[in-house]
Structures are given as C-alpha cells and as structure tokens.
Image: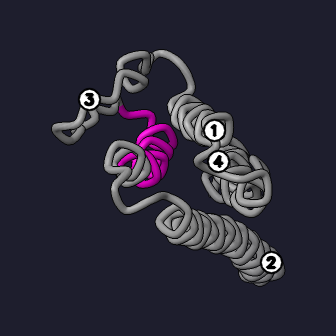
C-alpha cells in the first residue's frame, strides 16, 4: 500500500509536466497568431498610407470628386475588413458628394473584395480618362494588391484554429 501512495505523486508530477508543456504550446501558438495578425494590420496601415500619399500627389487639387472617393474608400477597406473578420454587418457613412459605386455594395457578399474592386475600377477609369499615366498606375499597383493580400492573410489566421490536441488534453485535466 505504501508503494502505491508514493506512485501517486509521480503520476501527478508527470501530468503536471505534460500539462505545462501543452500550455506552453498553446500560449505560443496564440501569441504567434496575434503577432502575425498585428504584422498584417501594420502592413495594411502602411499600404493605405502609401496609397493615399501617392494618390494625393497624382490627382489634381481641383479633382474633389476623385479625392473624396479615395479619402473614403481607403479607410473603408480597413473598416470593412475589420467588420468582415468579426462577422459584423457594416454600415457606411459617406460624405455629401454622391458616389453611385457605393450603392452597389452588397452586405451578403465579401465586403473587403467589393471595396477593393471599387478602388481598382475607379483607378482604372482614371487611367482610361488620362488622369493617371501608365507609369503611375504601375507605381500604385503594389499598394492596391497588398489590400487583398492582407485580407487573405487575416482570413487565414482567423480560419485556422489552434490545434485541437492543445485544447482537448488541457480541458480533460
């Protein structure tokens, strides 16, 4: 009987050690996900700023309609992505200038892609109208592409759960 009681403490020590290792794995995984998400959101911030600075330089001072569009649509992408990742319904507040392209926004579809599509369409129209040169279009292409790259990375982070083995064993004990 005495040997059996001594073995209980060994079992508890082993279980405690295994649980501590699993907790470390789970904590590290959660931190890695948080850090990756933070890097992606930072990349979106930087791309948005670069795109806004470039469009500010490319568009004429008198072109208030296009300036207003980009002033609203660039942060709208981030707002829509945030709502999309949290699966919230999004409502948009627009300025007094009419933007008929926002009327086609469908809340049932992928919001960030719709905003990115509107930005690409407007930018392409500026190119066709001669308000942007081909060189300028090439210069801003990387920022426009980075919007959907960040969206995809954030969706990957959101949709990839912490491995079940890290959670199930801890819950059992």
Lateral position of residue 127 relative to residue 58, left or right: right
| Marks 4, 2: nearer the viewer | 4
Q: Which circle's residue, 4 or 2, is located before the other in the chain? A: 2
Image location (x, y in percent) of residue 98: 26, 29
| Marks 3, 4: nearer the viewer | 3
* Residue at disc 4, secondary structure: helix
Residue 162 in view: no
Q: CA distance from mark 3 to mark 1?
A: 18 Å
Q: Which circle's residue, 1 or 4, is located before the other in the chain? A: 1
Query: Magenta stretch: residue 134 in it?
Result: no
Residue designated by label 4: 151
Residue designated by label 1: 120
Residue designated by label 2: 14
Q: CA distance from mark 1 to mark 4?
A: 15 Å
Residue visible at 33% across and 29% down in the picture:
99
Mark 1 Cα shell of 10 Å, populated few (<14), some (14-19), many (≥20): some
Look at the image and give the residue range highlighted in magenta.
72-88
| Marks 1, 4: nearer the viewer | 1
Q: Which circle's residue, 1 or 2, is located before the other in the chain? A: 2
Tell me the quarter of the image containing the N terminus.
bottom right
Instruction: Find out whether the residues at labels 1 and 2 contact each other: C-beta distance under 8 Å.
Output: no
């Amino acid at each position: 009987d005495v040997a059996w009681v001594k073995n209980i403490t060994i079992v508890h020590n082993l279980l405690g050690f295994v649980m501590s290792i699993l907790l470390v794995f789970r904590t590290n995984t959660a931190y890695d996900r948080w850090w990756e998400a933070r890097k992606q959101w930072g990349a979106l911030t930087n791309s948005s700023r670069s795109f806004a600075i470039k469009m500010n330089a490319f568009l004429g001072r008198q072109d208030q309609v296009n300036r207003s569009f980009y002033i609203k649509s660039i942060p709208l992408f981030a707002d829509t992505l945030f709502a999309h990742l949290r699966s919230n319904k999004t409502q948009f507040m627009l300025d007094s200038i009419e933007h008929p392209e926002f009327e086609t926004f469908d809340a049932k579809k992928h919001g960030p892609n719709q905003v990115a599509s509107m930005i690409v369409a407007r930018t392409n129209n500026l190119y066709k109208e001669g308000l942007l040169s081909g060189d300028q279009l090439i210069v801003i292409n990387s920022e426009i592409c980075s919007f959907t790259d960040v969206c995809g990375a954030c969706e990957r982070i959101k949709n990839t759960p912490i491995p079940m083995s890290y959670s199930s064993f801890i819950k059992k004990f």
